[in-house]
Image: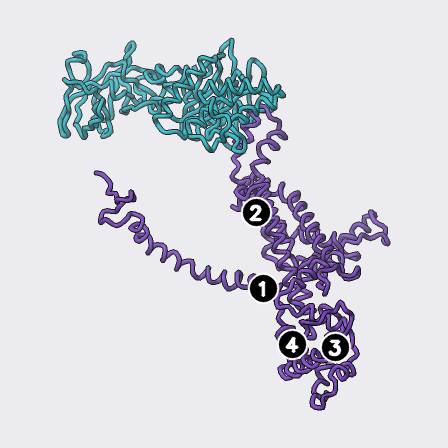
Amino acid sequence: MSDATAPDGSVLAADGTPLKRSLARSLRLQKTRALLLVAPLLIFVLVSFIIPIGAMLFRSVENSQVADTLPLTVAALQDWSPEAGTLPEEPVYAAFVTDMIAAVEAKEHTKLGTRLNYEQTGMSSLFRKSGRRIKRLDTESGAPLKDQLIAVDKKWGDVETWATIKTHSVRYTNGYFLNAIDMQRTPEGAAVQPEDKRILLKLFGRTLWMSLAITCSCILLGYPIAWLLANLPARKANLLLILVLLPFWTSLLVRTSAWKVLLQQQGVINDILVWLGMLSDDGRLIMINNQTGTIIAMTHILLPFMILPMYSVMQTIAPSYLRAAKSMGATNWTAFWRVYFPQSVPGIGAGSILVFILAIGYYITPEIVGGTKGVFISNRIAYHISSSLNWGLAAALGAILLAVVLILYWAYDKIVGIDNVKLG
Amino acid sequence: MADGSLSDAFVEFERVQKSYDGETLVVKDLNLAMPKGEFLTMLGPSGSGKTTCLMMLAGFETATHGDIRLGGVSINNIPPHKRGIGMVFQNYALFPHMTIAENLSFPLEVRKMGKSEREDKVKHALDMVEMGAFGGRRPSQLSGGQQQRVALARALVFEPELVLMDEPLGALDKQLREKMQFEITDLAHRLGITVVYVTHDQTEALTMSDRVAVFDDGRIQQLAPPDTLYEEPENSFVAQFIGENNTLEGVIKEIRGGTCLVQLDDGDLIDAKPVNVTAVGERTRVSIRPERVEFNKDRLSPDAHLLKATVKEFIYMGDIFRTRLSVAGNDDFIIKTRNAPDQVRLKPGQEIEIGWLAEDCRALDA
């Protein structure tokens, strides 16, 4: 029996249709059914994950507040350049007053003030004040609005004010990202922030450094436990596994607060050390509200995420490997280091990725035990989201964090290989 | 026979016992002596203690009591890595993160051997198992049979005098297993190494070994060369375990010279050879191999006792015919006949008479 072949060389099915099309048709129903089965999850992921991330990335560059609220002013400012050091001409002031009246009608002027206040302090109150008085200005008589406006607030006679408005009138800005790395958008282009405002880069550095320290201490503490779990008899291993998982059943807040009780200067650990005579009463250790506190508490909280992947990898390493190594003349240490350890590296890799990525975005624990010296970039993001309401900057910080994680992930893939990661 | 002490013993177990929980003995009073160059197989059902014995010899388990000697020196307190014993594991235990050449190089590296010497030995060992072209591959890229060869080469590369093999062919298919059986014995004899081989496959044990130790219940039931083991089992366990076997139960009626008369439970009398029965009136279990049963009266001595049998089933197996009979209340009495042109093919329901030579029928413990 020979297969039917079309003139162009493709194989035909029994009824003469090309085999490929025939195959696709026969699989279509299956594929549709499979797609329907995963549809709820797919939609959930899309709505709760992809769309918010997309929205965040968009918000980190989106900047239509100025252009939308002051369209005429922005157009009039086109020809003006702050470099000359002179104030804009009358038409700009006239356009601004028209825009402002419309904005006050729509109650948009305070939002605009808040937006511009991120860039230059005092803008918020300036817009509030001007908003209250804008309708009292004499727009009929033809008296110069420039003077009238400067009379309302002398800041309108300041080149700086108009420069800020012009600089941030673009619809898509790199301003938030510049702010996120301690720079600012100026009429002359990007510039470094003044000394006293540079904190974010330091925070990024600290977040990375501390996450790394937490990951390392998790590896050091977790490896022996994972080894025990994988090598103890089943009954004891199960008990130990429950002890490892126990923290998962306790509220995160409770665990973090417990560390506060333990670590503070009048806390349990210091009291015991003083009682044992190892510390003098005025030499109590400061272990909380600093980096030490954050590292200790977060290592404890993230430890299960390190132990579990390590354990699942170690479980698959047959004891016969170690025996084989020893039968060939390797000492216990050589057998461990040359044979067991390399096989457990995928577990370390998986655990490290999990712990590092969780740590880098951690918020609650550093907030509670970190004081000012032990906080992470995520605490700053939270501040901008809930207190300063500078969502654009928060989004830019989040986007940078996301990029850092992706870059590290990529680097890890290049160095260790993501195929070497086993989560179970 | 079971204690087999030899003056020139290379491997010796003396009164070795092993218990894991302090309540039951896994190995009960093991005595075994092997000369240099012997291929000895430990054969037994799972849980019979054979693997435990191997692990004690390798040093991964400690003997609860007794002495294990290698080359005359007690090794009870020598850690495994100093014993210099090569070992092939059931699942090969090839290190997955190393190439084949690195795997073989490992035992030489831990012995601090120079690089060029290492490379020579690795190459030589791989050539020996015809795997010379695979040095750069990873174990996962090899087939089961190839991994088996590499495991063998790795156990031999540091030239141990004693090699232990723990069911090394268990994971291979039948054809490959038979090929490897031959290759392993050939290699062992060529290199003159002493081998302790553990298996639960009796064919493997019979075809490969110089001597076989049949384990059951923590003891060596019989230690003998394969032919002796098959033809002259010393007790019912060995007779049952090695090869196919028919058993009938009865009482000793009479012992005279090399033969005895056994009265089966339904009253019939048969001839047998007393093996471990001593007194008249003792209960016995007689054992006879299916291929030694004869139903052609011309081939039996005229005064032989015969038994009536009913044919239950006839199975054509190509080279032989296998016929199931009902004899003296036993419905699973098997006879095997060679497929020859003049061979009779029995039919179910047929009534026949069967008999055998007295020395083929062994009266064993009940």
- Badge 1 element: helix
Judge left or right: residue B290 versus residue A233: left
Judge left or right: residue B17 versus residue A390: left
**Residue B8, how many percent across, how many down?**
51, 9
Q: Chain drawn purple, letter?
A: A
- Mark 1 or 3 closer to N-term? 1
Which quadrant of the figure has residue B168?
A: top left
As drawn, B107 above or below A186: above
Q: Are marks 2 and 4 in contact (CB under 8 Å)?
A: no
**Kind of residue indicated by mark 3:** Ser
Q: Locate the N terminus of chain A and report the quarter of the image it occupies.
A: top left
Q: Which residue is mark 3?
A: A125
Answer whether residue B125 is visible to the viewer in this image: yes
**Closer to us: B263 or A108:** A108
Which quadrant of the figure has residue B172?
A: top left
As drawn, A207 above or below B130: below
* Residue B35, numbered label: none
Which quadrant of the figure has residue A348?
A: top right
